[in-house]
């Protein structure tokens, strides 16, 4: 069943148009990666879905509900858990307080999150500001999971992290996938993202230009659309 369906989405920053026709679907339990070179509209697509920069044209439907006109907190409550670029958490709260602050009923409890990220369990009483970048990213993902989202959105979750921490994050993403979590992921680590994705959607200049399975994204297509 389709969980998220975005069609012909157009989004502007003031007078400047950033999205010209984005089409994107995520099914229940599916991992979809949104790809494209820098500035092609990946973050803007996520901001449009989450209501931070609402679309001016097109349709975005999530779990049967039209998202047009809804503010971000209402969209979040429908079951979209966003881990934005830049791993936001409350620096002056402890790890535990950060996690509990976003909790909504469901299988993702403090125990479940700290079983996924053991490092968080070891640091429950530590202030978020004292965590390493990787631990803060785990906390940001943990906070999104604590909302018990039907769709988890990860925007550059592994950017700027040490390779070993990155591996921990990818291991967690693979576990979430195995657990049936629907995920929309943007990430520049191609091998890892193609290894976990069921489907890829490629943006160029604010438009969806290609979508298909990771095996169909040939080196020629990668060269044409992703410049790798
Ligand atoms: P990156 O991989 O570099 O994060 P992206 O694919 O996520 O890129 P976006 O950040 O969505 O791309 O940017 C899409 C377009 O919108 C770009 O042309 C960018 O310059 C523009 N843009 C992004 N944020 C703003 C903003 N706050 N105001 C005006 N234009 C913006």
Image (tube, helix red, strand yellow):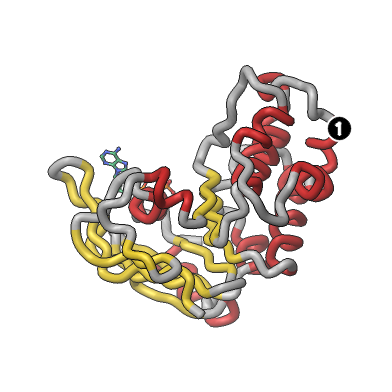
Residue 58 rendering spot, x and y as whole percentages: 23, 66
Q: Is the residue 159 above or below the residue 178 in the image?
A: above
Which residue occupies 79% across, 50% down?
112
- Does any portion of residue 199 appear in the rendered image? yes
Q: Is residue 19 left or right of residue 144?
A: left
Residue 144 rendering spot, x and y as whole percentages: 60, 46
In the image, the residue with mark 1 has its CB under 8 Å from the nearest atom of ligand 1: no
Q: Is residue 102 left or right of residue 170?
A: left
Q: Ligand 1 sits in which quadrant? A: top left
Q: Looking at the rendering, which quadrant does residue 185 occupy?
A: bottom right
Which residue occupies 79% across, 29% down?
124
Which residue occupies 77% across, 22% down?
126
Which residue occupies 54% across, 82% down?
216
Label 1: element kind: helix
Pointer 1: residues within 10 angstroms few (<14), some, or many (20+)?
few
Q: Is residue 65 left or right of residue 132?
A: left
- Does any portion of residue 224 appear in the rendered image? no
Q: Nearer the viewer, residue 27 or 65?
A: 65
Residue labelled with disc 1: 122
For the image, the number of numbered tags is 1
């Amino acid at each position: 069943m389709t969980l998220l369906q975005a069609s012909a989405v157009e989004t502007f920053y003031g007078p400047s148009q950033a999205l010209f026709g984005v089409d994107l679907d995520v099914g229940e339990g599916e991992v979809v990666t949104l790809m494209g070179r820098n500035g092609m509209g990946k973050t803007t697509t996520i901001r449009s879905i989450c209501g931070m920069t609402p679309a001016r044209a097109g349709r975005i439907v999530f779990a049967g509900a039209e998202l047009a006109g809804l503010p971000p907190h209402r969209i979040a409550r429908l079951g979209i858990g966003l881990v934005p670029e830049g791993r936001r958490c409350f620096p002056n709260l402890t790890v535990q307080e950060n996690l509990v602050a976003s909790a909504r009923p469901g299988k993702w409890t403090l125990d479940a999150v700290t079983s996924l990220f053991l490092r968080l369990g070891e640091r429950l009483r530590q202030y978020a500001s004292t965590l390493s970048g990787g631990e803060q990213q785990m906390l940001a993902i943990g906070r999104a999971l604590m909302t018990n989202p039907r769709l988890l959105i990860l925007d550059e979750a592994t950017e700027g992290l040490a390779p070993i921490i990155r591996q921990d994050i990818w291991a967690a993403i693979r576990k979430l996938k195995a657990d049936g979590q629907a995920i929309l992921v943007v990430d520049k680590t191609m091998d890892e993202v193609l290894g976990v994705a069921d489907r890829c959607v490629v943006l160029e200049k604010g438009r969806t230009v290609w979508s298909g399975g990771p095996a169909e994204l040939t080196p020629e297509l990668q060269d044409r659309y992703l410049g790798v």
